[in-house]
Image (tube, rainbow, N blue to C red):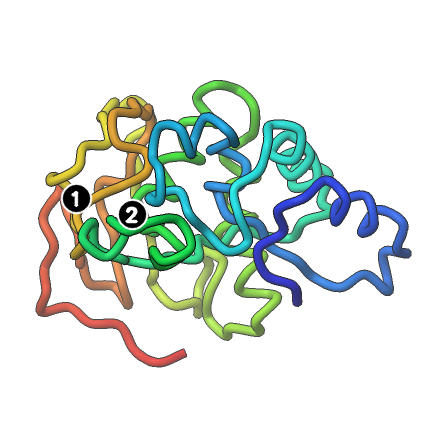
Amino acid sequence: HILHLTTEDECDFLRTLPREHRISTEVCPQHFTLTAPECYEQLGTLAQMNPPLRTKRHADALWQALKDGIIDCIATDHAPHTLAEKDQPYGKAPAGMPGVETSLALMLDRVNRNVCTLQEVVYWMSESPAKLYAMQGKGRIEVGQDADLVLVDMSLKKTVTNGELQTRVNWSPYHGMELKGWPVQTIVNGQTVFLNGEVDKSVRGREI
C-alpha cells in the first residue's frame, strides 16, 4: 500500500499495471483540492506538506485516477500543527496540515457539484479502507457490522472558519471556503459522539 500519491506520473504508472498485480494506493483531499502556486501564495508555510501540493495538472490527474478506480481510497494525513509551529520559514516549518474535520465535507460538496456520487464517497472513505486494512465489522451498514455511522445534511452550507473548528489547532487550509454538505451526527458503536456541532467526550471508540 502506497500513501499520499501526488503526481500524474504515479497515476500513469499505476495504469500500466495489470489489475490483479496492482498495489493499493491512497490520496489526500488537499492534493486534488489545493494547487500550486496559488496555495503557497495564499497560505505560505501553512501549505507546506511532504509530499508537496502540486500544480493543477497533477491535482486533476489524481482526481481522475480516483474516479477511474486507479486510486483505491481517500486518507487525510491529518497533521495538527499549531499556527505558531507553522509560522517559520519554508523548510523549517513542520510539514502537514489538519484535515480530518473537513475531509467529508469537501467530498460532499463535490457530490453537490455533481462531480462524483455519494456512493463513490462512501466507497472511497469507508468501504474501501475497511477492505484494504481487513477491518472486521467496518465499512458497511448491515446486520452484524459495528454501528459506526455518520448522518449528513446534503443541503447544509457552512463556511470553514478558523477558530470555529473542533481540531485542537483550530485552523484549516480551507478557511473562508463555503462547502455544501456536512456531517451532523456521528455514531460510534451505537453511541452518539457528535451531534449538531457538539462532541460528547464521554463516548470512546476502541482499538481495531
> What residue lies at 39% left-to-right and 54% top-to-bottom?
96
Name the quadrant of the C terminus: bottom left
Discs 1, 2 touching: Cβ within 8 Å: yes
151 sits left or right of 19 in the view? left
- Looking at the picture, does residue 122 appear above or below residue 113? below
102 sits left or right of 131 in the view? left
Which element type, helix, strand or loop, lies under badge 1?
A: loop
Badge 1 amino acid: Leu
The answer, for residue 167, to whether it is visible in the render is no
- Looking at the picture, does residue 157 appear above or below residue 80? above
Which element type, helix, strand or loop, lies under badge 2?
A: helix
65 sits left or right of 39 in the view? right
> What residue lies at 28% left-to-right and 58% top-to-bottom?
80
Q: Nearer the viewer, residue 120 or 34?
A: 34
Write down the residue under mark 1.
Answer: 165
Write down the residue under mark 2.
Answer: 101
Q: Nearer the viewer, residue 174 or 180?
A: 174
> What residue lies at 60% left-to-right and 65% top-to-bottom?
131
Location of residue 182 in the rendering, given as x and y in whole percent from the top left corner: 29, 34
Badge 2 amino acid: Glu
Q: Nearer the viewer, residue 41 or 110?
A: 41
- Residue reaching furthest to the top: 113
> What residue lies at 50% left-to-right and 74% top-to-bottom?
136
- Looking at the picture, does residue 151 appear above or below residue 109? below
Task: Say how many tags the image has.
Answer: 2
- Residue reaching furthest to the front: 89
Q: Residues within 10 Å of mark 2 (few under 14, many from 20)?
A: some
Decide which of tag 1 and tag 2 comes sooner along the chain: 2
